[in-house]
Amino acid sequence: MKNNESYKMPRAGRVMHFLWDCAGGDRFLLERATYSDQIKYLCLGGIVLSTGLMASMAGGYAFYTIFSPKVANVLDKQKMANMPLEVPIDIPTVVLSIIFGIIWGLVIFNIDRFIVAATGKGDGTEKITRQEFVGAIPRILMGAIIAITISKPVEIRMFKSEIDAALAKYQEVQKNEAIKRADASYATQVAQAKLKMKDLDVQITDLEGQVKELNTQIMKETTGQNGNGAAYGPRAIALDKQRFGIEKKINDLKATQDYKDLQSELKSAVVKRDNERLDAEKKAGAEDGLLRRIQLADEIAATREDGTKGFPWISIFITLLFMAIELTPVFFKMMLTKSPYDYIKDNLEDELRAENGIEVQYDYYKDKNGLERHLVVNHDAENLMYEKSKLSQIQKELTDYALQKYKEREQENIDANLDLYIQKNA
């Protein structure tokens, strides 16, 4: 390199600063480190941010799936046309889903940021040692849980068409079975009620038959079909009175308490059947939940083309994909070698410890498990402790000296005048 040439670090913009913050990097130190360090933390921050965004979308979709209005057949919400499916959207639920999605995304973002920031550099080499891996297990488990919570809502959205078809079929089966049970119960109640009112029905049916026959005869009388001429004569009047008497008997039978109770029982059976059918619709709609969709997604992913069941490879690979995205920063930081950023950070930490009188003696001793531990010496605290200890010791010596002098003086008073001392202290 020529003498008049000098290396100029590319200036970091606001986006880079923001992504550094997402990765938990120190902006002050990164601006004084190499460009390679800046890019590393830029990428780490991008992964953390993208995880938070995916969590936000997945959480919002899961919330909408749970709380959106339900119908007995999920396909009823879709309008089939010569274009993509148009599904009606519930605006209040969408607003709540957006709010929940933002909150959920921020929660996952903050947890993920903590996982990345709390993961150290290990031994500073590219090799992931057993000790490093064991130490990272809690962070790996947290990252895996986050990956699963993100992947499942995405998975049910990817298989939405297949899930809707399977769910509609399942809802229809459940609804029809419930309706059949309601109809069977209704038929049983109706049969029991009719059995109880069999005698009354026979009487009423017989009387109604008589009324029908009388109506026919009266019509013949008044229309002249009986050959006597068309007139409402004495015979027609007698037939009419006879019909009136029979109708009164019918009304009297229907007015009995037994008949009313049986009719009320039949009406109650109809109401009960209608309510059970309505409940069947509601229960079928309740099957359209997040858990049911996740179960159906797993079943669909495990179904082969011939309809047989296999291993849900698609579902597993989707989950593994999100786990890879989530856990990449953890393994990445364990594989990183020490860079200028790390040395600058260590130097700054040493300066801060020195300014505050803290000394760290590395690998000073081994613990019970044989692991090397650092000895931390807090000089300011030790100096203060030493000062307090010396002051306490001096105070103790002065107290002892004062008591000794007091003793000597009192002894002189006793020797000079014993009687006066006894009289004074009597």
Image (cartoon, rainbow, N blue to C red):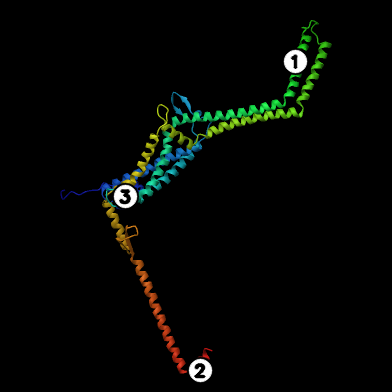
* Residue 93, position as x, y percentages in the image: 50, 37
In this rendering, the answer to whether 133 lies above or below 279 is below
The tag earlier along the polypeptide, 1 or 3, is: 3
Q: Nearer the viewer, residue 224 or 423?
A: 423
Q: Residue at x 50, y 28 (%)?
A: 169
Quadrant for residue 108, please give it.
top left
Q: Which residue is farthest right?
A: 234
Front one among 151 and 83:
151
Which percent across, then down, holds residue 323?
A: 37, 41
**What residue type is disc 3 on?**
Arg
> In the picture, residue 238 is in which quadrant?
top right
Q: x, y (%) of residue 319? A: 39, 39
Reading the chain from its start, which is encountered first: label 3 or label 2?
3
Res. 94 in view? no
Q: Is residue 114 left or right of residue 8?
A: right
For disc 1, the neighbor class at 10 Å (few under 14, some 14 to 19, many from 20) is few
The residue that mark 3 highlights is 130
Horizontal arrangement in the rendering, residue 270 relative to residue 47 (left or right): right
The mark closer to the camera, 3 or 2, is 3
- Residue 309 sits above or below residue 240 on the image: below
Pointers 3 and 2 in contact (C-beta within 8 Å)? no
**Residue 242 appears at what percent x and percent y?**
81, 16
Q: How far apart are marks 1 and 2 (CA)?
A: 147 Å
**On screen, residue 295 above or below 377:** above
Q: Residue drawn at (64%, 28%), measured in percent from left and top?
A: 186
Q: Is residue 208 above or below residue 318?
A: above
Label 2: which residue?
419
Q: State left or right for residue 245 relative to residue 144.
A: right
- Residue hosting label 1: 212
**Mark 2, other Cα within 10 Å: few <14 / some 14–19 / many ≥20:** few
User: What's the CA distance linking mark 3 and mark 2?
Assistant: 87 Å
Q: In this view, does 309 lie to the left or right of 42?
A: right
